[in-house]
Image: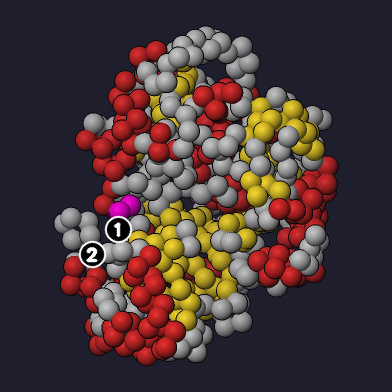
Amino acid sequence: CAFATLLTIALQWSASDAFSLNGPAFVPNVARTNECNSNNKFSTSSTCLSATIEEPAVVAGEKLEEYVKSRGGNRAIKKVLIANNGMAATKSILSMRQWAYMELGDERAVQFVAMATPEDLKANAEFVRLADSFVEVPGGKNSNNYANVDIINKIAVEQGVDAVWPGWGHASENPKLPASLEAKGIKFIGPTAPVMSVLGDKIAANILAQTAKVPSIPWSGSYGGPDDGPLMAELNEEGTIPDEIFEKATCRNVEEAVEAANQIGYENGIMIKASEGGGGKGIRFVENEADLRNAYIQVQNEVIGSPIFLMQLCKNARHLEVQIVGDQHGNAVALNGRDCSTQRRFQKIFEEGPPVIAPPEIFQQMEKAAQRLTQQIGYIGAGTVEYLYNADSGKFFFLELNPRLQVEHPVTEGITGVNLPATQLQVAMGIPLYNIPQVRKLYGKEDMYGTDSIDFLEEEYKPLDSHVIAARITAENPDEGFKPTSGTIDRIKFQSTTDVWGYFSVGANGGVHEFADSQFGHLFAKGPTREHARKALVLALKEIEVRGEIRTTVEYLVQLLETGAFKENTIDTSWLDTLIKEKSVQ
């Protein structure tokens, strides 16, 4: 069956799956008319509104208000600005519409306003069709549109939205966005600005993790604390780490770096990092003091003025992550997690869950550590605590806490039955986590609509009985070093089954433009075991057909899934880069 709409694919999934998006939860708006002035580069006064969607009935609003009140919330969010595009915008609208229908009986109880660039409109972007209305914003790089805090604020105010959903990428990790929205009385669906800001600093984040007794890999902040142990600190009134503790974790000159390296040890190698670095800048690997002295100066010159710290290299590591959600009432739940070890240049290729490489008792420790950190810092919303895990030693180390939802979140939805964008929405409405029906169901509560409290640090959720493996569908050319490609897409043919579901950010006669993320699709295979899910994903990838001007990595993904190392689950984060370097997979 040819891919015509996301709904066509989703209808074939079981209603019990949180990420199936099944049933009449979304009725496609195929008769949208564009009332935009094509010369209007950015004018929220001439909003591009759907000509076929009416305002939600009063009764829908009343149902939402009643639901929020009955679940212990304090704020009914009836209109949301989606400050994102592509996969993020598409998935968020689909998921929250599904929740609205299944919970309230009206998929349009919450209205969605989209932002759309001329490039996204020309490319027939799926999220524009899904939204109730959209505002055309300037094209080009994302600083002109989806990452522009001023434009997001302007639209939010002029469109009268109750909240802003940031997604991932773009402005999702910019503390200026939640701070500016809060000043206007608009809810940011995510953490507060101070918490987001401190998590964005690698040094501060590691100190906070240590304070919550989350294991950290040996680094320059592993010493100087109580009894010369790890540095620890609580957030001060400004929401930051006290300066004197922060400074102890940094290496302000070469001699301090040498001293820290001697404490850490050179056995596994040492990473010199600028806390404000990124994209390959401000990072060096060294194995001795002579190289360290030279590399420190290089890092210092690459990211001028940035604090610098040292960290031991974790070899043969797996990238495991825990999906956490915190609420406004001090609760924090861990919704199992994912194994994202298949990476190319730190870009995830496959994601799967649960992370079976870690024994259940070890992964439970990772979950509890993530929950302690979430509660310690007062984190609100969905986030991901990432770890490096050594399968040989069974040890795990804190990597970072991403203060946002991640593109691979449907893996968690598939194994837990919890709709994550809808959970974000309910948390933003002030509903305690233990009053969210899907969370209660996961924890085996007989009454999904009860209001008895759950101690998430003590109680356990029900055993998981399935495995999900996801594959990102990208517009990249594997024959040219995975160079991004752009162009029209005439048709996407995808045959869904009872085991495989997928969604795409473009429809028929659409395309991927030069400013878009290269990912335009995501497939999720589910089975009772990892091997069952792997085989289902292979078959689905073999059947998918993308016709148009772009190149995709689909055939390459099939070859990776068929390798012995992937089948036997013996990979680590360097596995794929090694294969590419050796050209082991063509």
Residue that badge 1 annotates: 198
Disc 1 element = helix
Residue that badge 2 annotates: 241
| Amino acid on which the number 2 mark rests in the picture | Ile
On the rendered structure, is 499 left or right of 335?
right
Q: Which residues are magenta?
A: 195-199
On the rendered structure, is 368 left or right of 129?
left
- Comparing 264 with 24, the one in front is 264
- The residue drawn where x is 61% and y is 27% is 123
| Amino acid on which the number 1 mark rests in the picture | Val
Disc 2 element = loop
- The residue drawn where x is 63% and y is 34% is 512
Residue 197 lies in the magenta stretch: yes
On the rendered structure, is 405 left or right of 10?
left
- Comparing 13 with 269, the one in front is 269
Vertical position of residue 328 compared to residue 71: above or below: below
